[in-house]
Amino acid sequence: MRRLQKTPPKTTRRPLSLSTEGADAYPLRLQKFLARAGLASRRGSEALISAGRVKVNGELVCELGRKIDPQKDEVRVDGRLVVPASDHCYLILNKPAGYLTTMADPQKRPVVRELVPVAEHPGLFPVGRLDFQTTGLLLFTTDGELAHRLLHPSRHVLKRYVARVEGQLSERQAASLRFGVLLDDGPTKPAELRIIDVHQNQANVITTVELAISEGRKRQVRRMLAHVGRPVISLNRISFGPLLLDDLASGTWRYLSDEEVSALRDKVRDKGDGTDRPIFCNKPDAECST
Ligand code: URA
């Protein structure tokens, strides 16, 4: 089997680690610090400061010019301690076919670990899994709490796939996939589906569909399509929640931007009680709970 490029690709930006920011990164603007910690976008962080919700070392800060040293200063939003996005790493890989989503395989088959910078980021792991032959967007992080939330069924993180299937998918089959089909481990939740293309050559017909699901059951898309009599020929994940694969080359990875990390955190933030508790508040602190 052909092994794809293993050398780290060019990346669009450095990791979020404050320790790799370089000397000129300190002091850091307060709004940038808040955005990096995943609280909100840069603009949203500015709004928090202007609204008088941010304190630095116990002092209320309402003006935007303030700079802080993340290693020395204590920042609180609504009384809750903000933990810097210090050492966590977030990246996406465009997984090629023929790789296992695991960090090690006793049978020595190719594993995704070979394609991501594990030496630079100890503890890096994939968030969820793609089948051996499935290609596309696979998120990696060292942030266990965020990963746990993203994978939790209650968060309904939407995953979008493009599948090529055998035969022509009828409207009736499409409708039943949208509604939900009964698999051996229970009915599937409603899915989004659109037919992108129907291709006919001399021997057969191939339909290309885009399918979005919020569940993450084993081989779910393949089983759903097989259930309606349209076995998958190829499957590619093009998005995961707010993250888009776009034109990332197969076998290469890139770090997430601050905005992408914020968007991910936003997706899984507790909203039930209206307080939007920051999920980065993880220090022992009476005012801080997640
Ligand atoms: N559904 C599948 O069937 N396979 C994957 O890899 C992901 C979703």
Image (cartoon, rainbow, N blue to C red):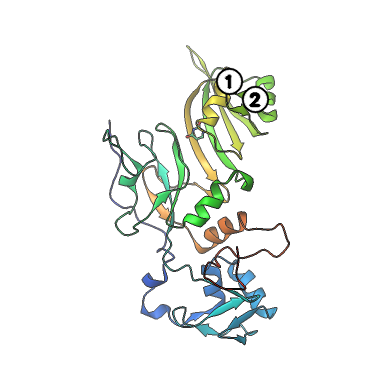
Q: Is residue 171 above or below residue 126?
A: above
Which quadrant would the C terminus be assigned to in this image? bottom right
| Left or right for 19, reference 266 | left
| Left or right for 114, reference 13 | left
Which quadrant would the N terminus be assigned to in this image? top left
Do callouts 1 and 2 mark residues in contact (Cβ within 8 Å)? Answer: yes
Instruction: Name the residue located 36 percent from the left edge and 79 percent from the top edge.
Output: 23
Residue at the farthest bottom position? 59
Which residue corresponds to mark 2? 181
Instruction: Name the residue located 58 percent from the left edge and 48 percent from the top edge.
Output: 241
**Residue type, mark 2 in image:** Val
For label 2, the crowd category at 10 Å Cα-Cα, with few meaning under 14, some 14 to 19 and many 20 or more, is many
On residue 97, which mark appears?
Answer: none
Q: Is residue 242 above or below residue 77?
A: above
Percent from the top left, x then y, of residue 166? 52, 19
Which residue corresponds to mark 1? 227
**Secondary structure under the numbered disc 2 in the rendered image:** loop
Which of 98 and 145 lies nearest the eye of the viewer?
Answer: 145
Residue at the farthest top position? 203
**Residue type, mark 1 in image:** His
Q: Is residue 145 above or below residue 151?
A: below
For label 1, the crowd category at 10 Å Cα-Cα, with few meaning under 14, some 14 to 19 and many 20 or more, is some
Residue 259 can be seen in this image = yes
Residue 198 can be seen in this image = no
> Between disc 1 and disc 2, whose residue precedes?
2
Label 1 – label 2 distance at C-alpha: 8 Å
**Secondary structure under the numbered disc 1 in the rendered image:** helix
Quarter where residue 208 is shown: top right
Percent from the top left, x then y, of residue 218? 50, 32
Percent from the top left, x then y, of residue 237? 50, 39
